Image (cartoon, helix red, strand yellow):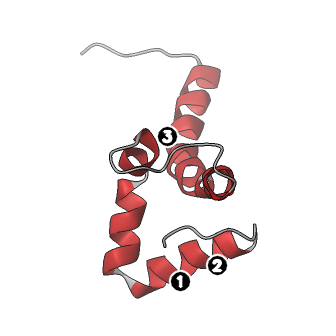
Amino acid sequence: MRQIHGSPAVLVAIFLVLALAPLLYVASIGPVAWLADRQLISTDEGSAVLVIYAPLQYAADHNAAAEAAISWYASRRRVRVFA
């Protein structure tokens, strides 16, 4: 049987990236909403912003708790997320 030897630092880094990526994705809605509210980025139909954040929009549309959490987070930054 073959054993795989890897550096513990590399394994920790991979774990951290995989564990933090979803959190960072959701947290990034605040700065993006701030930029969109000030019309510094485009939120037109089909824009990259709408495509990237479509899963959050879907979650907000289909789950009241998700909508409340996302709206609360954005309100802490004094912006509207989902009009």
- Can you give x and y, in whole percent of width and height, for residue 47 in the image? 40, 43
Q: Residue at x 60, y 24 (%)?
A: 8
Q: CA distance from mark 3 to mark 1?
A: 26 Å
Q: CA distance from mark 1 to mark 2?
A: 6 Å
Q: Viewed as shown, does residue 59 lie left or right of 28?
A: left
* Picture disc at residue 18: 3
Q: Which residue is mark 1?
A: 68
Name the quadrant containing residue 61.
Answer: bottom left
Tag 3 secondary structure: helix
Q: Is residue 2 above or below residue 80?
A: above
Q: For the residue marked with disc 3, what is the amino acid?
A: Leu
Identify the mark nearer the N-term, 3 or 1.
Answer: 3
Mark 2, residue position: 72
Depth check, mark 3 against mark 1: the one in front is 1
- Give the percent coordinates (x, y) of residue 7: 58, 16
**SS at badge 1:** helix
Which residue is at a point 61% across and 70% down the rendered structure image?
80
